């Protein structure tokens, strides 16, 4: 049973973990346990707690499920509410609970004001995950202001924990960082209006866990706007953890009878280190979050023209590229920025989503039919939430952007941001994309966002500043509606690379553009960090030209291919400048990729070696009776040319056929996992793919 109840205690069990909470004699909803599985609910008790002196309240001293500001709590609390008369605390009774299948709902109600909070716990038993979210309900006739409303609160007993998140940049996403949670609060927050390249809406809390050992408590927020994570080491021997929408510049007016739903926060616990955590999350994403229409299909090999042509797109040039991409084996041809308005650089035309008839005199149709003739589907880039000052859209609707009336409008990449809290803007964006999809045979949309939100607007202040939430939710609404009307179209989420990689976008998109940085060495690091939380299937990775634009680094094409093949392969090189030899190598690898991509996109991931800590870098995917191993030697020293690599995730007694360096031989799973593969690698940027298959 996933949900057990005994007296005032609730026990939520997945296959591998337990989570317990209970209502104590004072009516306080307390968090009791999170960790390895404990089957017997009878073991749990609510030990008595009491205020210690006039300074330490019982509520502060204990772990809670829904702490609220006030009532002599001084920790970071999970919500803050303000009633019409200025009262600012939430004193609740547990009104009741309901269990429907694997969903537990607990209702808290204020003892005086007509206000309820519902706490939801949905147990995914098989997937080892618990989904948490909340709802605030105004039952009365006066408005109520919500000033903080996290999705979930967690507690972990003990001290000396570390918290891991990212500390990245544009072109440097997913760089993992860990900090001790010693005293006070550790905060991770995005105030950019989107997830950001810097931090990610996730926490991993542990005690020095490594890839294969250690306990990891983790939670991932299904949200793409401003978020906040707080880990607070209390003086009471527990760490309080909160995850949800950021409370910075957040104030939501709940009108009479209105409700507000928080985004979901998924929580998991692993006693097998980060590797087990990642595999659990990847499986969960595919099974529960990805859009159903495409979640069980492999992603196509795409060609994207951005790095090759930048804004300089035209019918002729794109046709030539399409022919070459088709010959190489690409299955999808994506025209990036520059096809619309008068867009010859980043100064103009965002918002004017009409084909540039100078670049494409007969519209997109001739290019699309040509792309199809050479065996590919057609995709296109768009940045729907933006507008340039130099655009017809802005000239016609200067009031459609976020702006303070007495200030100059802030720009980022020379563009303004459309005010998605306005219904007419939402409608405009929907219609613009819908028109493209109706007019042309487009099977793929790359949805970009190239700046952070800079300002909100004056009028909204009167109603409370929930503009950040409204923007995110309307962004979801548009894409949801588009998907409903065009179910066969695939969507890629991009925000100058990985600025919008989160479980919120995962619901609506089929893949992410992971990073604008396509340098294969930097990518090893970015892709490794990404893989902690996100699945390979969503990780678009392109092979581009060498030297790379970002750092002028030259890397052999095979290494670049092996790096990109570890995710959903794409080609972004200028095919006009490529030698015959390079083209042959790419063609051969695309062919191989098509044979093995199912294992990569749907397999279980094992991070075997990390080049910053080990001699070389290696990752392995395992699916059913097959495995693919990617090996990368970044720099070889002292003529060393033999390396050993122990594999994981195989059957001990099974015999496997190994294809290594074109030679096929047999080994047992035990040999491969205990003794290891022998690899011939030498020099700088040597790499290989080893294929392993059950005999
Ligand atoms: C940023 C994206 O990350 C790039 O791939 C490209 O689409 C450009 N925008 C186009 O402006």
Image: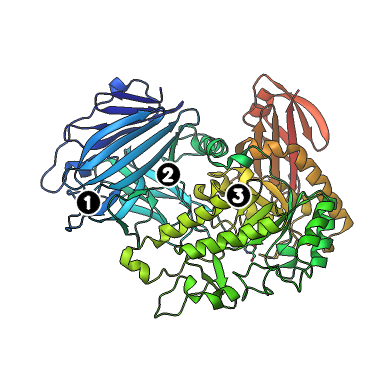
Judged from this view, the residue extending furthest toward the right is 580
Q: Are marks 2 and 1 in contact (CB under 8 Å)?
A: no
Work out whether mark 2 precedes mark 1 in sequence or the reverse, and give the earlier one: 1
Residue 74's tag is 1
In the rendered picture of this protein, how many numbered marks are placed on residues?
3
Work out whether mark 3 precedes mark 2 in sequence or the reverse, and give the earlier one: 2
Please tell me which residue is depicted at 62% across the width and 53% down the height of the picture. 492
* Residue 453 sits above or below residue 665 on the image: below
Disc 2 to disc 1, C-alpha distance: 25 Å
Quarter-wise, where is residue 677 in the image? top right
- Looking at the image, which is closer to me, 664 or 225? 225
Residue 32 placed where, x, y %?
Answer: 29, 33
Quarter-wise, where is residue 588 in the image? top right
The residue singled out by tag 3 in the image is 485
Left or right of 489, for residue 473? left
* Residue 594 sits above or below residue 45 on the image: below
| Other residues around mark 2 within 10 Å, as few (<14) / some (14–19) / many (≥20) | many
- Looking at the image, which is closer to me, 642 or 199? 199
Left or right of 572, for residue 611? left
Disc 3 to disc 2, C-alpha distance: 25 Å
Secondary structure beneath disc 3? helix
The residue singled out by tag 2 in the image is 264
Residue 26 placed where, x, y %?
Answer: 16, 35
* The C terminus, quarter of image: top right
Q: Are marks 3 and 2 in contact (CB under 8 Å)?
A: no
Please tell me which residue is depicted at 53% across the width and 61% down the height of the picture. 427
Q: Depth-wise, is mark 3 or mark 2 nearer the camera?
A: 3
| Other residues around mark 3 within 10 Å, as few (<14) / some (14–19) / many (≥20) | few
């Amino acid at each position: 049973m996933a949900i057990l109840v005994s007296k005032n205690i609730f026990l939520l069990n997945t296959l591998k973990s337990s989570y317990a909470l209970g209502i104590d004699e004072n009516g306080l909803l307390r968090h009791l346990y999170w960790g390895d599985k404990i089957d017997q609910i009878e073991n749990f008790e609510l030990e008595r707690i009491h205020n210690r002196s006039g300074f330490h309240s019982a509520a502060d001293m204990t772990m809670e499920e829904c702490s609220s500001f006030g009532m002599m709590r001084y920790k970071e609390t999970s919500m803050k509410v303000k009633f019409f008369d200025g009262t600012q605390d939430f004193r609740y009774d547990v009104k009741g609970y309901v269990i429907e299948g694997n969903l537990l709902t607990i209702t808290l109600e204020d003892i005086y004001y007509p206000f309820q909070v519902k706490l939801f716990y949905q147990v995914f038993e098989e997937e080892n995950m618990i989904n948490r979210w909340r709802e605030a309900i105004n039952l009365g006739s006066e408005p109520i202001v919500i000033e903080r409303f996290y999705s979930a609160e967690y507690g972990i007993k003990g001290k000396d924990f570390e918290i891991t998140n990212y500390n990245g940049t544009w072109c440097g996403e997913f760089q993992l960082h860990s900090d001790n949670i010693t005293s006070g609060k550790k905060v991770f927050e995005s105030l950019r209006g989107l997830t950001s390249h810097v931090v990610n809406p996730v926490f991993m809390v542990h005690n020095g866990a490594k890839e294969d050992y250690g306990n990891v408590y983790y939670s991932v927020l299904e949200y793409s706007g401003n978020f906040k994570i707080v880990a607070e080491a209390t003086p009471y021997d527990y760490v309080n953890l909160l995850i949800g929408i950021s409370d910075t510049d957040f104030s939501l007016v709940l009108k009479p009878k209105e409700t507000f739903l928080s985004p979901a926060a998924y929580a998991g616990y692993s006693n097998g280190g980060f590797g087990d955590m990642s595999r659990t999350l990847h499986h969960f994403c595919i099974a529960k979050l990805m859009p159903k229409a495409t979640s069980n299909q492999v992603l196509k090999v795409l060609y994207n023209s951005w790095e090759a042509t930048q804004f300089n797109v035209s019918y002729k040039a794109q046709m030539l590229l399409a022919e070459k991409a088709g010959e190489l084996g690409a299955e999808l041809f994506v025209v990036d920025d520059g096809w619309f308005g008068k867009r010859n650089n980043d100064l103009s035309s965002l918002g004017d989503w009409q084909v540039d008839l100078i670049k494409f005199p007969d519209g997109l149709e001739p290019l699309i039919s040509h792309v199809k003739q050479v065996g590919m589907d057609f995709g296109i880039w768009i940045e729907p939430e933006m507008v340039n000052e130099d655009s017809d859209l802005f000239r016609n609707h200067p009031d459609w952007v976020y702006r303070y009336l007495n200030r100059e409008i802030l720009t980022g990449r020379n563009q303004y941001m459309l005010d998605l809290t306005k219904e007419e803007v939402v409608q405009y964006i929907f219609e613009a994309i819908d028109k493209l999809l109706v007019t042309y045979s487009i099977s793929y949309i790359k949805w970009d966002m190239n700046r952070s939100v800079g300002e909100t607007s004056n009028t909204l202040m009167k109603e409370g500043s929930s503009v950040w939430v409204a923007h995110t939710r309307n962004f979801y609404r548009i894409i949801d509606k588009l998907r409903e009307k065009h179910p066969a179209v695939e969507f890629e989420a991009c925000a100058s690379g990985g600025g919008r990689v989160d479980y919120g976008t995962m619901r609506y998109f089929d893949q992410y553009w992971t990073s604008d940085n396509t340098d294969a060495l930097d990518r090893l690091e970015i892709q490794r960090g990404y893989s902690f939380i996100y699945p390979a299937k969503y990780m678009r990775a392109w092979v581009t030209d060498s030297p790379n634009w970002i750092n002028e680094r030259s890397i052999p094409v095979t290494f670049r291919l092996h790096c990109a093949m570890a995710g959903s392969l794409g080609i972004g090189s200028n095919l006009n400048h490529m030698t015959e030899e390079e083209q042959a190598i790419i063609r051969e690898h695309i062919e191989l990729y098509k044979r093995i991509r199912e294992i990569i996109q749907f397999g279980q991931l094992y991070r075997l070696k990390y080049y910053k800590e080990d001699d070389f870098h290696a990752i392995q995917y395992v699916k059913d009776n097959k495995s693919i191993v990617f090996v990368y030697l970044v720099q070889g020293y002292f003529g060393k040319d033999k390396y050993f690599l122990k594999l994981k995730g195989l059957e001990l007694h099974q015999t496997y056929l190994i294809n290594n360096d074109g030679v096929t031989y047999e080994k047992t799973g035990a040999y491969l996992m205990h003794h290891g593969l022998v690899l011939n690698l030498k020099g700088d940027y040597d790499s290989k793919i080893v294929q392993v298959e059950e005999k």
